[in-house]
Structure formats: C-alpha cells, structure tokens
Image (spheres, helix red, strand yellow):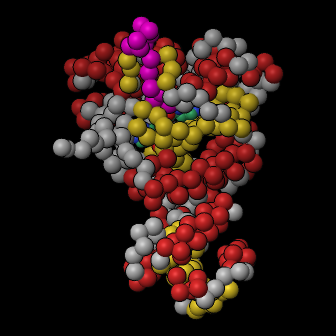
Amino acid sequence: MEIITAIKGFKDILPQETGKWRYIEEMARKIFTDFGFREIRVPILEKTELFQRSIGETTDIVEKEMYTFLDRGGEYLTLRPEATASVIRAYLEHSIHAADPVARLFTIGPMFRRERPQKGRYRQFHQINAELLGLDDPRADTEIILMLIHFLKSVGLADLRLEINSLGCPECRPAFKESLIGLLQDKEEGLCGDCRRRLTTNPLRVFDCKMEQCGTIIAQAPKLLDFICSTCRDHFERVKEFLKDFELSFEVNAGIVRGLDYYSKTTFEVTTEFLGAQNAIAGGGRYDRLVKELGGPDIPGIGFAIGFERLISLLPIKDEDFILTPQLFIAALGTEAQKKAFVLCNRLRTMGLRTEMDYTGKSLKAQMKRAGKLKSRYTLILGDREIVEKKAELRDMQKGTQETLSLDTMEEAIIKTLREG
Ligand code: HAM
C-alpha cells in the first residue's frame, strides 16, 4: 500500500529542525518582550468576512489564495492568510482597546495562502508578527522598524536591505488614482485581463501584477510618494530622521505598495539578494483606518510580519547546533542489569537529566555503538557481573576516560557528574 503524503506546499518541520525553530521563536519572544510587546494567540480559522473586509476583496490574497470553505453550519470560514486581521479582531472583541488603546502585541504561527509553491513560497508558512496599536506618532513607526531590524540582526541575519515608502492617506489618494487611471486607460490594450479589471475595481493593485506585459506599463506609472499630502510627507520625513538617529540604513523605494489594501502612510520591506524571486523576508506598515473598518474606534496601528521559513533559510545556523544529545546512555547487559538500568534511566529523566538506554539487550559493543551514534556525553556500563561485584563503569565519551563507581553510591555520583558537565 502506498503511503499518504502531505499536501502540496505544506511542509513538515522535522525533529532535527525544531531546535532551530525554537531558538528563533525564543529570541523573538525575548526581544519583543524587551520592547514591551505581549504575546497573543489567535485561532487559525476565522470568518471569511474578516479577511475580505481587512485585506480587501480585490487583492490577490482574497481573490485567489485563500483556503475558504463552507462550514457544516452554513458559514464561510477561512484558514488565516495573515495574522493582523485576527489580532485586531481579538483586540476589539476583548475590549483590549477600552482599557488602554495602546497595545503592543505579537503572535507566531502558521498562515495559509494557496500560491504556486516554489523555493521560499509555501501554502502553509509561518510568520512572526508584531502589531503596535494606538499610536500615530512617527516614533511608533521607528520603534517597530528598529525592533524588526534588531531582531533579524540578533538571530544572525547579515546583508539585509530595509526599504521604506509612504502610501499616503485617503486625502492623498484621489489625485494619485486619477493620474494612475489616466495612464492605464491610455495603455489598456497592453494590460492583462486581471489588470483591466483592476482598473475599475482597485487600480492600486495593478502594482501586484507579475505579468511581463503589464510590468513595462506599470514601470511608467506615477508613484504615490509623489502625491502625498503635507501631513503624510511630514510624518514620513520624521520617520526617516529617527531611523537615521538609530543609524539604521534604509532606502526609499516608491515601488513598495504591499499586497494588502489596509496600508496607509509608512510601509516597509526587508529583503536580501540571497532569496531569488521570493526576496522579502519581512514586510509591514501602518494601517490607520483598519481598526475602524473592522467596526472599532478610530485607532491607528502599525506592524510587520517576518516569513519564518525564509528567515531560517538565510541564517548561518546548523540543525546540529540545536539538537540536545543525551547526557548519559546506559548500556545494560543481562536481566538484572536491564532492570536496574530501566529504573535508573527513568529516575534520572524525572530529575531533568537527558538519559537513554537500549531495551533490546544487544551486545555491549552494539550498545556502545548506539551511545556513540546518539552522541551521548557519558555512558554507564552495567553488566550482571558488575552487579554481582557491586560496581559500574562510567565512561566519559569525550575524553575517553573511565571511572569505576560503587553501586551503592552510583546514582549520586552520576547526578553530580551530569550536573557539573
Ligand atoms: P506579507 O508581506 O503578506 O505581510 O507577509 C509577510 C512575510 O511573510 C513576507 O515578507 C514573507 O517573508 C512571508 N510570506 C508571505 N507569503 C509567503 C509564502 N507563501 N510562503 C512563505 N513565506 C511567505 C503580511 O502578512 C502582513 N500581515 C504584515 C503586517 C503585519 N502588516 C502589518 N502588520
């Protein structure tokens, strides 16, 4: 019978990899907590409407990529394609904003987008996501960007590029839209079917088009940054000044439009040349109208998400560096020794000491080989003869030295040795 494999674009994170994942998660928890962020865990499944209303009906994510199904109860549900909408839903639903509108929240977990799988692009992927709600001060933008870069550098990411842009506010959009539509209408025959449709539904989304034919037209398009109002320009200038104060190098890239509709003012992406086509490690920006659009008060926000898989693929860390090998392997020969070893092995485990043994009763040579394979620090050799003689041998596998222990005091001696080294 054939084995059943995982779904295309869905990946297992294998035991040898999870140490690395945990290390990065722990670093994120530590650094984000230092910046005053608190962890929130939100469901993976939400009402479809939540994403339609936040990400936008006419974005690629909502139009083409969501895993949506009709629940047995007759309601449309969606596997979350991102976390921001869920975090804000929870912020409103639990009145977190009523106690204090300023909230720094982060969440880590899987997201789902039915994109075409390729290197660095999966259908289930993981994000480390942070949201700062309740502050429209440019220092909030700076703080969030600083935290992102500090985290990425702290986990060992070298050669990152920070690009920033401003997408303005509803005040600045109409003039830009008009100019963009003007150009697109002139070149309409050259556009793909999707972009022709976008022309009337959501012109800004033409910038997400990956078709070559549209690329050349879009390259001539006006830039939102040239249309932003004085308030947005002032905000953007101040963010840039603050970033310089922290000696954070960045480039202004007026081409950053982001693929989600909720953004306004500052947007940013962190990229690297080592990822090929899928070069964004992280992306984010301000979303000053989103809380209101989701039925809440007029509360601004800004946040980012880091692509876990993309980040991990770039780090100079090896799986082996995070695998915890046994501190002790007990090689037990004979019935009496096996019995004693079983008790000792599990007693040491309950004391927090990583201990392994072999239940098969193979030869000493085979058991020593296994201890070596597991890279155990020490091996305890316990044979029936040793039991009669009331002793056991403790071998230091690193130094190659061996010590004879008396059976009566063996446990304490082992605990002491393992705890010391
Ligand atoms: P996003 O740019 O759609 O933003 O995703 C953020 C990051 O998730 C990307 O830069 C990338 O590293 C990773 N990512 C996205 N799609 C995939 C995929 N199919 N496979 C692997 N990695 C992927 C957001 O999701 C916003 N919610 C970010 C945000 C938070 N904005 C404000 N707050």
75 in the magenta segment:
yes
Q: Quarter of the image holding residue 327?
A: bottom right
Q: Quadrant of the N terminus?
A: top left
Q: Is 81 left or right of 27, judged from the image as shown?
A: left
Say whether residue 324 is left or right of residue 79.
right
Residue furthest top as drawn: 74
Image coordinates for residue 107, horizontal then vertical, percent:
61, 37
- Name the foreground residue: 19 vs 345: 345
Q: Residue drawn 29% across and 39% down? A: 8
* Magenta-colored stretch includes residue 136: no
Q: Horizontal placement of 268 versus 27: left or right?
A: left
The C terminus sits in image quarter:
bottom right
- For the point 74% across and 23% down, which residue is it? 96
Q: Nearer the viewer, residue 169 or 24?
A: 24
Q: Where, by quadrant of the figure, is residue 32 drawn?
A: top right
Q: Is residue 6 visible?
A: yes
Q: Nearer the viewer, residue 24 or 378?
A: 378
**Which segment is the magenta one?**
70-82
Examine the residues drawn in magenta and state their main secondary structure: loop
Residue 307 point in image, percent of width and height: 48, 44
Residue visible at 62% across and 33% down in the picture = 41
Please tell me in which quadrant of the rendered image residue 302 appears.
Answer: top right
| Residue shown at 39% from the left, 24% from the top | 66
Residue 227 placement (x, y as % from top left): 54, 25
Res. 236 in view: no
Residue at the far right in the pictured view: 99
**On screen, 305 above or below 100?**
below
Q: Would you place residue 66 above or below residue 160 in this image? A: above
Instruction: Establish if 142 lies above or below 157.
Output: above
